[in-house]
């Protein structure tokens, strides 16, 4: 069953007359009607302003006769890419596509979005991580010391910090939920002891361990601010010492250990087979 928005837009299209001649004439009056329709559908004020800005640009970039023709959208997107980032161009394209759908000219729409290539984030080495810990200790910054240790030694998610309570740390396990999947993060004994010591020294007897001065659980956007002075003192770019890079360090370290264990198992199995072959091999000698 069509939604209210689909029914209203369908009715709008039925009363429209296609423009004769080559291409399709676009007017600001049509754009304003489209925006008024969106506003009547209880769209957020910010969304309406966003669409008005993008569609005004779309109108201004049309040919002098203000008619859209096949091929215009492709060339328009290319011209936008010379001025704006891919994400902004995708947003402009989406707004124009919605308007073209409204006026009943989907044949001009562009399909697909521009994929923005993100530069790979530089990896943090284990030695650099240990240097950061030493620096945090030298600065007396126990909070940052523990945060870095938590991310790098458990793979803990930043947004799960409110769940890192005194009660959970005492049990040595924190229940997290990532992508609706329940996970249990085990807190190693050495970190468990340090976290509880930190909580005791700061008068935290229950609830979240990492808090602001007002007693609220710290937000993830605040953590880079906390870590920046330690990174500067350690002479390590703060873009390389984020919670995400510390988590990746945890997984890469774990993968290396598991790989070594697998190699040891393979070597032990090989030695056992050799011994058995000497004892009961088909061929003697």
Image (cartoon, helix red, strand yellow):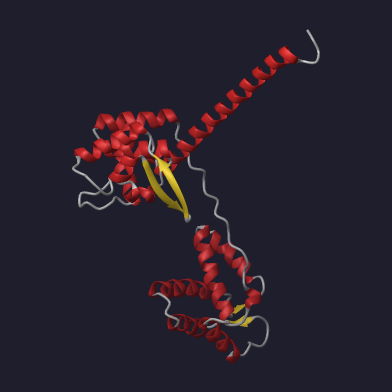
Q: Which of 203 and 238 is in front in this view?
A: 203
* Point 48% across, 71% down: residue: 54
**Would residue 197 be seen by someone viewing this image from the given angle?**
yes
**Where does residue 47 sit, x and y in percent of width and height?**
43, 72
**Where does residue 159 sit, x and y in percent of width and height?**
38, 51
**Where does residue 114 sit, x and y in percent of width and height?**
58, 59
In-image side of 42 versus 107 (left or right): left
* Point 32% across, 28% down: residue: 134
Q: Which of 124 and 184 is in front in this view?
A: 184
- The quadrant of the image that shows the N terminus is bottom right
Q: In which quarter of the image is residue 264?
A: top right
Q: Nearer the viewer, residue 205 or 249?
A: 205
* Point 45% across, 81% down: residue: 41
* Point 69% across, 19% down: residue: 273
In-image side of 50 versus 148 (left or right): right
Q: In this view, does 222 lie above or below 67?
A: above
In-image side of 245 versus 1 (left or right): left
Q: Is residue 214 above or below residue 140?
A: below
Q: Is residue 81 above or below residue 53?
A: above
Residue at the front extreme of this rendering: 280
**Would residue 241 be seen by someone viewing this image from the given angle?**
no
Residue at the top extreme of this rendering: 285
Q: Which of 119 and 273 is in front in this view?
A: 273
- The quadrant of the image that shows the C terminus is top right
């Amino acid at each position: 069953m069509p939604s209210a928005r689909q029914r209203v837009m369908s009715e709008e299209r039925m009363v429209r007359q296609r423009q004769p001649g080559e291409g399709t004439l676009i007017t600001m009056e049509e754009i304003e009607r489209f925006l008024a329709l969106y506003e009547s559908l209880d769209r957020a004020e910010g969304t309406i302003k966003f669409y008005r800005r993008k569609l005004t640009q779309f109108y201004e970039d049309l040919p002098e006769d203000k008619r859209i023709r096949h091929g215009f959208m492709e060339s328009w997107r290319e011209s936008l890419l010379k001025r704006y980032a891919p994400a902004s161009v995708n947003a402009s394209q989406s707004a124009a596509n919605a308007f073209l759908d409204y006026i009943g000219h989907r044949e001009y729409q562009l399909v697909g979005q521009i994929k923005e290539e993100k530069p790979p984030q530089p990896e943090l080495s284990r030695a650099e991580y240990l240097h950061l810990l030493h620096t945090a200790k030298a600065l007396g910054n126990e909070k940052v010391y523990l945060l870095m240790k938590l991310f790098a030694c458990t793979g803990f998610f930043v947004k799960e910090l409110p769940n890192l309570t005194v009660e959970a740390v005492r049990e040595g396990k924190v229940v997290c939920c990532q992508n609706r999947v329940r996970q249990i993060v085990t807190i190693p004994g050495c970190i468990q002891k340090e976290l509880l010591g930190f909580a005791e020294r700061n008068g935290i007897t229950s609830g979240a361990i990492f808090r602001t001065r007002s007693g609220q659980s710290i937000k993830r956007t605040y953590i880079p601010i906390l870590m920046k002075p330690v990174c500067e003192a350690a002479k390590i770019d703060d873009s390389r010492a984020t919670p995400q890079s510390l988590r990746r360090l945890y997984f890469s370290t774990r993968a290396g250990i598991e790989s070594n264990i697998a190699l040891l198992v393979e070597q032990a199995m090989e030695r056992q087979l050799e011994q058995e072959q000497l004892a009961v091999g088909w061929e003697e000698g």
